[in-house]
Image (spheres, grey):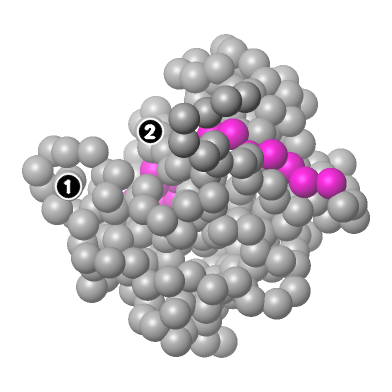
């Protein structure tokens, strides 16, 4: 192709047990999908229809994190309230529209641990003004994602524990069973709004305990059965 400016490549995330990469297309995020987190954000956790927002699927936003070692995240500009949100990330391997809940899990390629990093003060300003959240959620380096594990190699992901530590201190601790909308329900609902395609990622929501981090701190996110993700704020 003869592009008038340099074309950016596809972001590839490592897949456990192989040298192949998972090519990222779109990144969808589910808002307030744990009751505890909904409460701490000042919202009613009643089971209303889920809502979604997006992060960029490019190499500016997504940070592939190795199974071992530490990925570095630059502290973003124009914020003094930079938050972590540890999440189970669902990687879509088979696309579709209007997917039935009963069929939804057949569309999953695998799972990873990810962080929905958030400029909370900027997000709050946008919410107060009734404006979109992009500057709070879709900035550079806002979506570190760990190694993807194939769905057939992960047993009991719906019951897995999820935790996040900051400098060795546990800040978030819950289970995937506490999702307001299950993985299958989330996929089914999202597919009524968008045609899902292979390469899509879904950040499934974060438990209560979100908080601010500073330069020099290290975050470790874990979902039982998956490779952990470790990042340092620089």
Which residue is pictured at 80% across the width and 42% down the height?
Answer: 151
Residue 30 covered by magenta stretch: yes
Q: Residue at x 84, y 46 (%)?
A: 20
Asked if 7 appears above or below 118 in the picture, the reply is: above
Secondary structure of the residue carrying numbered label 1? helix
Secondary structure found at label 2? loop
Dot 2: within a 10 Å radius of its alpha carbon, few (fewer than 14), some, or many (20 or more) residues?
A: few
Q: Position of residue 8 (x, y in %)?
A: 55, 41
Mark found first going from the N terminus, 2 or 1? 2
Magenta part of the protein: which range?
20-38
The residue carrying pointer 1 sits among few (fewer than 14), some (14 to 19) or many (20 or more) residues within 10 Å by Cα, namely: some
Label drawn at residue 51? 2
Location of residue 69 in the rendering, given as x and y in whole percent from the top left corner: 70, 77
* Label 2 to label 1: alpha-carbon separation: 16 Å
Q: Quadrant of the C terminus?
A: bottom left
Farthest-out residue, top: 98
Residue 126 marker? 1
């Amino acid at each position: 192709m003869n592009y008038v400016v340099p074309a950016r490549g596809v972001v590839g995330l490592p897949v456990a047990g192989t040298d192949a990469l998972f090519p990222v297309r779109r990144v969808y995020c589910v808002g307030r999908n744990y009751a505890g987190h909904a409460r701490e954000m000042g919202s009613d956790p009643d089971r209303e229809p889920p809502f979604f927002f997006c992060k960029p699927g490019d190499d500016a936003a997504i940070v592939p994190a190795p199974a071992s070692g530490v990925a570095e995240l630059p502290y973003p500009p124009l914020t003094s309230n930079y938050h972590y949100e540890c999440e189970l990330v669902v990687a879509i391997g088979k696309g579709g529209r209007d997917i039935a809940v009963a069929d939804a899990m057949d569309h999953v390629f695998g799972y990873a641990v990810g962080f929905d990093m958030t400029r909370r003060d900027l997000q709050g300003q946008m919410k107060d003004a009734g404006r979109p959240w992009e500057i709070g959620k879709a900035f550079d380096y806002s979506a570190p994602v760990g190694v993807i594990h194939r769905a057939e190699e992960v047993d009991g992901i719906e019951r897995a524990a999820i935790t996040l530590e900051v400098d060795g201190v546990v800040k978030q601790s819950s289970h995937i069973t506490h999702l307001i909308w299950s993985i299958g329900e989330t996929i089914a609902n999202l597919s009524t709004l968008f045609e899902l395609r292979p390469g899509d990622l879904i950040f499934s929501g974060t438990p209560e305990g979100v908080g601010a981090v500073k330069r020099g701190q290290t975050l470790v996110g874990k979902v039982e059965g998956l490779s952990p993700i470790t990042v340092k704020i620089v």
